[in-house]
Amino acid sequence: MSILPTNEEILERLREVIDPEIGLNIVDLGMVRDVVISGDSVRIAIALTVKGCPLATTIESDINRIVGGMREVSSVSIQMTSMSKEELNALGARLQEMRTKQKGLGKAAGMSAGIDKLDRKGIQKIVAVMSGKGGVGKSYVTAMLAIELRRQGYNVGILDADITGPSVAKIFGLSGKPMADENGVIPKETETGIKAISMNLLLDTPDTPVIWRGPIINGVIRQLFNDVNWGDLHFMLVDLPPGTGDAPLTVFQSLPVDAVVIVSTPQDLAMLIVRKSINMVRQMNVPLAGIVENMSYMKCPHCSERIEMFQDSGIEKTSAGLNVTFLGKLPFDPKINRLSDLGQLERYASPEIDEFTRKVKTELLKLTGVTAIPIAWKKASS
Ligand SMILES: Nc1ncnc2c1ncn2[C@@H]1O[C@H](COP(=O)(O)OP(=O)(O)OP(=O)(O)O)[C@@H](O)[C@H]1O
Ligand SMILES: [Mg+2]
């Protein structure tokens, strides 16, 4: 007659479950809180590194498969909780220690992934641009924010974290592989001197589709931040892919993000999709600068009269209800599309973009707790 496995045997098998993001097993990571055997059922409590982590389902199905397949086990129930701040700090320190001890382990095993925050080096403020759904103008907003800040004389960089659908290179007409020296990869520079890195600049053929899973995306984004020699920047803008998947998760966990700007359009039904983004940002304790509505209305190219194309989305009211700063409405302007296609968006300017940039800067100052623009923030001497 076979007997149920012991707690130790189950723990041993749980070492086969790898946290897809960190690349180490969940037992060594201290994620297994409890294993309780009752009758022929096993109850396992897991503490995730991030509440609501999208990769939790992978961990869950691996546990079900492995423990569910052990002798005499007829059911497995998994309870997911999340680690406290103290536990996360301890884990971060342990990972750091493991990396130092086993130098090169991560790279050799193809796991440059991690959850610890990277050092911001010479970058003073990092702003990530996200949206609940695709095609709302994140890349446009990211690019215009960078362009406007550069016009004001700041040193600006753009990290295109949309690994599978990069568009920053195209908007700025950048091509050719970036060079590297002993200090790292040298970012490309746009016409007006914005430093930029985008995945399609690094591929042999820029139109190759990138089909990568979460852990790889995590590693690549960390490398684009860490292995690129960004130099001293006043602002880094991070262009995220749509939604709340692996890329935003990595950016929020790994980069010292100072503020997130959420882009929506008037069609975002009852802002349900926007709410999801807000919830992710809040869950991950990342400061939220506010929401901007893009393609809100049209400006007549002849007389600049405002033409309302949609019913009022009520975004001001909804933002207020959600306690999120409303950063303004940006008009639909066919010039934007044309200039982006030509790689010449730096030739575009509008009073609405000026105003939006001013608001983002104000929010950044509020979020980072400074009341006036400090010396280090002042315009780069030209
Ligand atoms: N205000 C605007 N007026 C006119 N065209 C715009 C405006 N904003 C964005 N566009 C155009 O809409 C298209 C989508 O914009 P963009 O690529 O910035 O969106 P996105 O949210 O980054 O998309 P994705 O989710 O695919 O990354 C582009 O062709 C862009 O030039
Ligand atoms: Mg985009």
Image (spheres, rainbow, N blue to C red):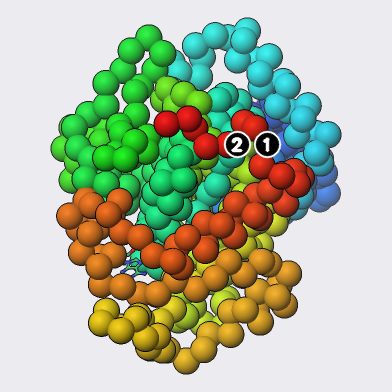
Can you tell which quarter of the image residue 331 is in?
Answer: bottom left
Q: Are marks 2 and 1 in contact (CB under 8 Å)?
A: yes
**Residue 77 in sight in this render:** yes
Q: Position of residue 313 (x, y in %)?
A: 53, 85
Image check: 344 left or right of 362?
left
| Residue sitting at x 50%, y 73% | 329
**Residue 19 in sight in this render:** no
* Vertical relation: 28 (above or below) 337: above
| Residue sitting at x 51%, y 14% | 105
Rendered-image quadrant of the N terminus: top right
Q: Position of residue 33 (x, y in %)?
A: 80, 39
Of residues 195 and 68, the one drawn nearer to the viewer in this rendering: 195
Image check: 247 left or right of 120?
left
Specify few, some or many for label 1: CA neighbours under 10 Å numbering under 14, 14-19, or 20 or more. few
Q: Secondary structure at mark 2?
A: helix
- Residue for badge 2: 377
- Asked if ligand 1 lies within 8 A of label 1, the reply is no
- Asked if ligand 1 lies within 8 A of label 2, the reply is no
* Vertical relation: 38 (above or below) 101: below
Specify few, some or many for label 2: CA neighbours under 10 Å numbering under 14, 14-19, or 20 or more. some
Q: Which mark is residue 80?
A: none
Q: Amino acid at mark 2?
A: Trp
Of residues 167 and 360, the one drawn nearer to the viewer in this rendering: 360
Q: Which mark is residue 374?
A: 1
Q: Amino acid at mark 1?
A: Pro
Rendered-image quadrant of the C terminus: top left
| Residue sitting at x 63%, y 44% | 258
Q: Position of residue 305 (x, y in %)?
A: 37, 86
**Count of numbered labels shown in the rendering:** 2
Q: Position of residue 167 (x, y in %)?
A: 30, 50
